[in-house]
Amino acid sequence: MRIGFIIGSLSEKSINRRLFYGLREVIGERAELVELPIGELPVYNRDLDDRFPDSALEFKRGLGDIDGLIIATPEYNRSMPAALKNALEWGSRPGGQNAFPGIPVGIIGASSGRLGTALSQHQLREVLAYLDMPTLGQPEFYYTFDAADFDPETGAVGNATLYRRLGDWATAFFDHVEKNARETERP
Ligand code: FNR
């Protein structure tokens, strides 16, 4: 099984990337995980619909080649980051060529705030519904980042509760992907 992932933060120190790497550790060999990078995508402009930049073409190609998608999103100003929304714009265009429909997706998120990205994820869910993506409902994964939960050297998850939560989420996510399996177009 080939699962794409998007990290909604462009920061090299991203706590969402750290959380995702914790999830990756828990997932182990259950799936091949491939990043769909969003950092090189220019700000979406519909004037480019007939001459997509290479980064956007690659992003869309990546979406065509996965069985499921995991989005790790921060919360910026009670919403999803602009970089993530921008990627959703590129993947959904030009009109009639939305690359997202049918891809089973799950969301996780880490923030420094107490809500653990709940508001950001809530908004993201609305957009994913419009993009026609079957989205994992439960368990939700809101996480208030605590550096003490991770090994400072290796990044491994050192907190048993977090490890178990990630494991439960991963199990539900893979069930969701299987239930919503789509025909993928492999090159
Ligand atoms: C934040 N942060 C934040 N946190 C939160 O819980 N709710 C919020 O609305 C916001 N708003 C916000 C706006 C902007 C522009 C920034 C840069 C940050 C704090 C945020 O949770 C923290 O910076 C995380 O580290 C962001 O995740 P990444 O980028 O490290 O993955």
Image (spheres, rainbow, N blue to C red):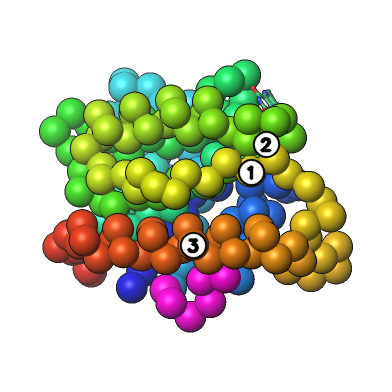
Q: Is mark 2 within 8 Å of ligand 1?
A: yes
For badge 3, the amino acid type reads: Asp
Res 68 → quadrant: bottom left
The earlier-in-sequence mark between 3 and 2 is: 2
Disc 2 marks which residue?
111
> In percent of the image, x 26 and y 42: which residue is there?
133
Q: Nearer the viewer, mark 3 or mark 2?
A: 3
Q: Nearer the viewer, mark 1 or mark 3?
A: 3
Q: Amino acid at mark 2?
A: Ser
Of the residues under marks 1 and 3, which one precedes in the sequence? 1
The quarter of the image holding the C terminus is bottom left
Contact? badges 2 and 1 (CB < 8 Å): yes
**Residue holding disc 3:** 168
Left or right: residue 79 versus residue 96 is: right
User: Main structural element of the magenta stretch: helix, strand or loop?
Assistant: helix
Residue 170 position in % (x across, y down): 46, 63
Would you say 174 lies left or right of 145 here? left
Name the residue at 44% across, 49% down.
139
**What range of the chain is rendered magenta?**
26-31
| Placement of 158 over or under 143, stated as above or below | below
Query: SS at mark 2?
Result: strand
Q: Secondary structure at mark 1?
A: strand
Q: Position of residue 101 (x, y in %)?
A: 21, 43
Q: Residue furthest bottom?
A: 29
Q: Secondary structure at mark 3?
A: helix
Say if residue 11 shows up in the picture.
no
In this figure, which residue is indicated by the disc labeled 1?
A: 143
Q: Earlier in the sequence, mark 2 or mark 1?
A: 2
